[in-house]
Image (cartoon, rainbow, N blue to C red):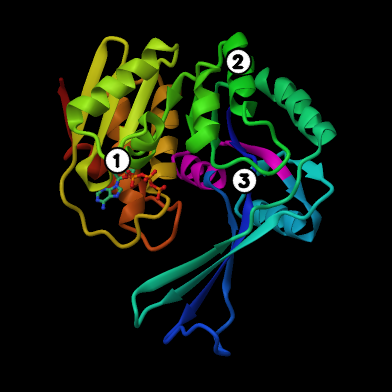
Amino acid sequence: MIITITLNPAIDVSYQSHHFQLNKVQRVANGSKTAGGKGLNVSRVLKQLGCEPLCTGFLGGHSGSWIKSRLNQEGLDHSFIEINEETRTCLAIIDNQYGTQTELLEEGPFITIAEKDKFLSEFSKMLEKAKLITASGSLPKGIPLDIYSEISEMANASNVPFILDTSGKALEYGIQGRPFLIKPNKEELCQYVGKQELTMDEMIDAAKKICETGVQYVLVSLGKEGALLVGHDTVLLAEIPEIPVINPVGSGDSMLAGMAYALKNQYDFKTCLKWACACGMSNAMEAKTGEIHLHKVQELLTKIDVTVL
Ligand code: ATP
């Protein structure tokens, strides 16, 4: 079983507007509502790859119940810790005329120490059945910055690979728990090392330094430029072909799912990197976030070149 952790899920509401103006009343068609959160996207893609992931994290209030009912409809297993405060709602206003997207992201509920402890205790039980763990996204209020480090140490103690996709302080602290793999994009890696820009050599150096701290692999996603997989004695570069992109949002989550699926199947690292890229690419070719098509993934796998650097 693969467990996906989403500590700060959201109801994502998106409105289409045709002339969005500040300080005006706008009439819009009903918004589309989805169960959002990076880890939920990872789960959706894993399911499309034929896995049966278990989603966990925190959910509360009516929003939390709504997310659970949507996951049920999507056939995704879940075991969330019930919290006292309401799960957040995030709003996107998409203007097709101006080509703009305005987002309002709530910071989310406050998690109490008791709720956090309950999560860790439930998680330690889930670990007994887990083959691999992924954790994605930001931390809700009240959650200590080193939570991903603690989760990673628990996974390491049970010999279960832990894959972490987060940024900023949560990444900085998370790395200290020696995750099996982290997946920053280029911007997140730049932020981690405190630089505006990084060349390919500098990215490899930065990733190697992270590996020296005990992380086994760093997967740097580079959007349309492909990806880099760096380990203690491995540097692999995936070069990808140009594709017709429709919506690349969630490609990082899809990449994580592809990597988790390939690792679970014990493919070699070149093949794992190809699966990760192919799933990210397939998602970029769809309008819906967290959607891939297996036949497209299979086709893309044959078009990705992986070079040993
Ligand atoms: P997000 O935060 O939206 O989930 P990310 O920044 O974490 O994304 P990206 O580097 O944008 O992740 O994308 C992950 C992978 O998806 C890339 O390594 C690549 O394989 C594929 N991908 C993303 N965007 C494109 C694109 N425009 N063209 C081709 N492939 C893409």
In the rendered image, the vertical position of residue 304 relative to residue 176, given as above or below: below
Question: In the image, which is nearer the foreground, mark 1 or mark 2?
Answer: 1
The residue carrying mark 1 is 196
Q: Earlier in the sequence, mark 1 or mark 2?
A: 2
- Quarter holding the C terminus? top left
Whether label 3 lies within 8 Å of ligand 1 gets the answer: no
Residue 269, visible in the rendered structure: no
Image x and y of residue 234, in percent: 26, 15
Q: Earlier in the sequence, mark 1 or mark 3?
A: 3
Is 191 placed left or right of 10 in the picture? left
The residue carrying mark 3 is 76
Q: Which residues are magenta?
A: 39-58
Amino acid type, residue under disc 2 in the picture:
Glu
Is 238 included in the stretch rendered in magenta?
A: no
Residue 13: mark in rendering: none
The residue carrying mark 2 is 153
- Quarter holding the N terminus? top right
Q: Earlier in the sequence, mark 2 or mark 3?
A: 3
Give the Cα separation between the discs numbered 1 and 2: 31 Å
